Amino acid sequence: IDILKLDDEEADNPLGPYTGAGTIFGVTGGVMEAAVRSAYYLVTKKDLPDVNFKPARGLEGVKEAEVDFGNGTKIRI
């Protein structure tokens, strides 16, 4: 293949579309937040409405939160 004779074309995105999950995983408590979001979706088939779920984040003290799935299911983390 003569690379110099190839037609120009737009580069692809080798990492795929961005979902924001990397941002969540990058903060303290982010893995728990992702787990809560996944559990919520699996139970309700909807995205967690509070996009900034912060009760599990941060380094200070022990974190506790309760998430009401709205269908009689509550989880405590």
Image (tube, grey):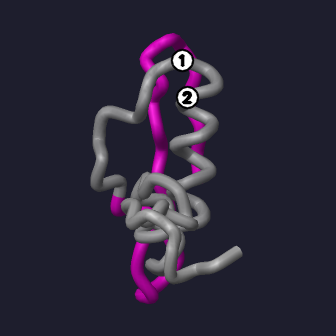
2 and 1 marks in contact (CB < 8 Å): yes
Quadrant in the rendering for residue 70: top left
Q: For residue 41, which numbered disc appears in the image?
A: 2
Say which element carries label 1: loop
Residue in the foreground of this view, choosing between 26 and 6 = 6
**Picture quarter with the C terminus:** bottom right
Q: For residue 67, which numbered disc appears in the image?
A: none
Give, as a three-letter code, the residue at label 2: Tyr
Task: Left or right? Give the position of 33 relative to 18.
Answer: right
Q: For residue 45, which numbered disc appears in the image?
A: 1
Please tell me whether residue 34 is drawn above or below residue 25 in the rendered image.
above
In the rendered image, residue 60 lying in the magenta stretch gets the answer yes
| Crowd tier of the residue under label 1, counting other residues whose Cα lies within 10 Å: few below 14, some 14–19, many 20 or above | few
In the rendered image, residue 42 lying in the magenta stretch gets the answer no
Q: Residue at x 31, y 33 (%)?
A: 49
Give, as a three-letter code, the residue at label 1: Lys
Q: CA distance from mark 2 to mark 1?
A: 5 Å
| Crowd tier of the residue under label 2, counting other residues whose Cα lies within 10 Å: few below 14, some 14–19, many 20 or above | some
Which percent across, then down, holds residue 20?
A: 40, 59
**Picture quarter with the N terminus:** bottom right
Q: Residue at x 48, y 61 (%)?
A: 12
Quadrant in the rendering for residue 14: bottom right
Range shown magenta? 54-77
Please tell me whether residue 57 is drawn above or below residue 76 in the rendered image.
below
Q: Residue at x 63, y 36 (%)?
A: 39
Q: Residue furthest top?
A: 71
Q: Residue at x 45, y 78 (%)?
A: 27
